[in-house]
Image (cartoon, helix red, strand yellow):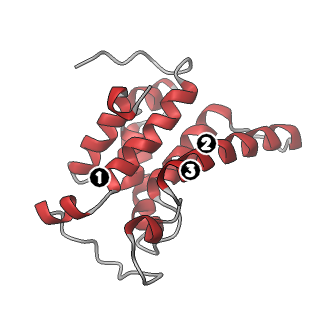
Amino acid sequence: MTIEQSIRAQKAKENFNSGYNCSQSVLLAYEDYLQAKGLEPKTVLRMASPMGGGISRLREVCGAVSALCLLIGLTDGYDTPDDEKKKALYSKVQELVLQFQDCKGSIICRELLGLEQKHDQPTPSKRTKEYYAERPCADLCATAAAIFEENYHQELPKVPET
């Protein structure tokens, strides 16, 4: 499946272009899945809100990658100490995060954006036409959403085509 064929990837891209941060955009593309797992999307969006800008504009791990990890944890995570489950989870996270890295060249926000400075001011950039035109973030969100969909499509509720 390509990113263009992925309904969830397209939803993640639309979410970003509607003003959500990278992490929120990817997670919201799985709103039905979150609900099926007993999570209120509004709560998840609040939890993901500091992850934008590579963790609150620190420009570290891309928010889309953080959301990918959270979705993997929701599906394959563990809730009691268990070294085997931890190993299996970490293995899956590494596999999919490295898949993102292979596709996009990095998992670090500042590298993906071509920024020199390590940390940024906490004030978010205004979402303007120019902002969206110069940022690869919508495509990064689409990539993360598509990677999860491709690897977990059997676990996911069927999304009707629009």
Residue type for callout 2: Leu
Left or right: where 71 falls relative to 21: right
Q: Residue at x 44, y 38 (%)?
A: 145
Quadrant of res 86: top right
10 Å neighbourhood of mark 2: few (<14), some, or many (≥20)? Answer: some
Between the residue at mark 3 and the residue at mark 2, the CA separation in whole angstroms equals 10 Å
Residue under the point 87% across and 38% down: 84
User: Where does residue 67 sit, x and y in percent of width and height?
Assistant: 49, 48
Q: Name the residue under label 1.
A: 20
Q: What element carries label 2?
A: helix
Q: Distance between the residues labelled 1 and 3?
A: 25 Å
Q: Indicate which disc, 3 or 2, sits on the residue closer to the N terminus.
A: 2
Is 97 situated left or right of 87 in this image?
Answer: left
Examine the rendering and report whether any part of residue 17 can be seen.
Answer: yes
Residue type highlighted by circle 1:
Tyr
Task: Name the amino acid, label 3.
Answer: Asp
Q: Is residue 38 visible?
A: no
Question: Which residue, given by chain and number where applicable, does mark 3 sit on?
Answer: 102
- Callout in the foreground (3, 2): 3
Q: Label 1: few (<14), some or many (≥20) within 10 Å?
A: some
Residue marked by disc 2: 96
For residue 49, which numbered disc appears in the image?
none
Q: Which of marks 2 and 1 is in front?
A: 2
Seen as rendered, the residue at the extreme right is 83
Query: Mark 2 or 1 closer to N-term?
Result: 1
Of residues 42 and 127, the one drawn nearer to the viewer in this rendering:
127
| Residue 34: percent from left, percent from top | 46, 32
| Separation of residues labelled 2 and 1 (CA atoms) | 23 Å
Res. 122 image quadrant: bottom left
